[in-house]
Amino acid sequence: MPLTLYGCLRSRATRPVWAAMELGLDFRRVPVIQAYRLKDPAAPDAPFNTASPDFRAVNPNGLIPTMEDDGFVLNESQAITLYLARKAGGLLGPRDAREEALVAMWALWGRGIEDDCLSIVQKKEPEAAAGRLRAPFAVLDAALAEGGGFLVGGRFTVADLNLAEIIRYAQPDRSLFEAAPQVQAWITACQARPAFQAMMKEREAEPL
């Protein structure tokens, strides 16, 4: 059974799909829409969604993304990306225990700012959210300067991929990036990668 990724791309499923494309993996994607986006997710003609019994059989949490790989089921987008990078080998994943710890550290760090980044793209008190993000953006800017433009090992890794998909939510606030030129250069480089471009092309083709 091929590697299967469940989820629509207007969700955190962008992360594992980008990773799978980055790694050149053979995978299939099963579109699963969030139940809250549907008027009646239980309707007979409702699209496959996070409340559908068949999806809940795969992920009882009813959340996307979810991965299934030869009977191994994994949830949480950043756990999936790390698994894919480790399984595939190569430069995207950590090379040793220290790099693995750094990947985990940046994943947790990113989760700490994700809600504020989302507030900007969702226009929910974006000015207050931007104010809270200025200090962590300065921290990230310094880390990227020290790391030669990357988070781990002086190269593009799953740590960059995961965090770039969080920082993307804050891009409508240009002032944050003007004050953090290393962050601006880094996100531009991440989003210029062919795998990101391919994933976003698929995302833009999805219904709103």
Image (cartoon, grey):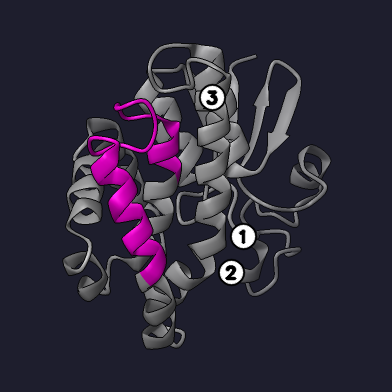
189 relative to 37, above or below: above
What amino acid is found at the position of numbered circle 1 in the picture? Gln
Q: Is residue 103 left or right of residue 136?
A: right
Pick whichever, 33 or 100, lies toward us: 100
Q: Work out which quarter of the rendered image holds the N terminus and state it.
A: top right
User: Marks 3 and 1, how far apart in space?
Assistant: 36 Å
For the residues marked 2 and 1, what is the alpha-carbon distance in whole angstroms?
6 Å
Q: Which residue is mark 3?
A: 98
Q: Which residue is mark 2?
A: 37
Q: Which residues are magenta?
A: 135-162
- The label on residue 34 is 1
Residue in the image at 20% along x and 68% along y: 179
Magenta: main secondary structure equals helix
The residue lying at 41 percent from left, 12 percent from top is 90
Q: Is residue 127 left or right of residue 73?
A: left
- Residue 191 image point, x, y percent: 24, 44
Answer with mark 3 or mark 1, whichever residue precedes in sequence.
1
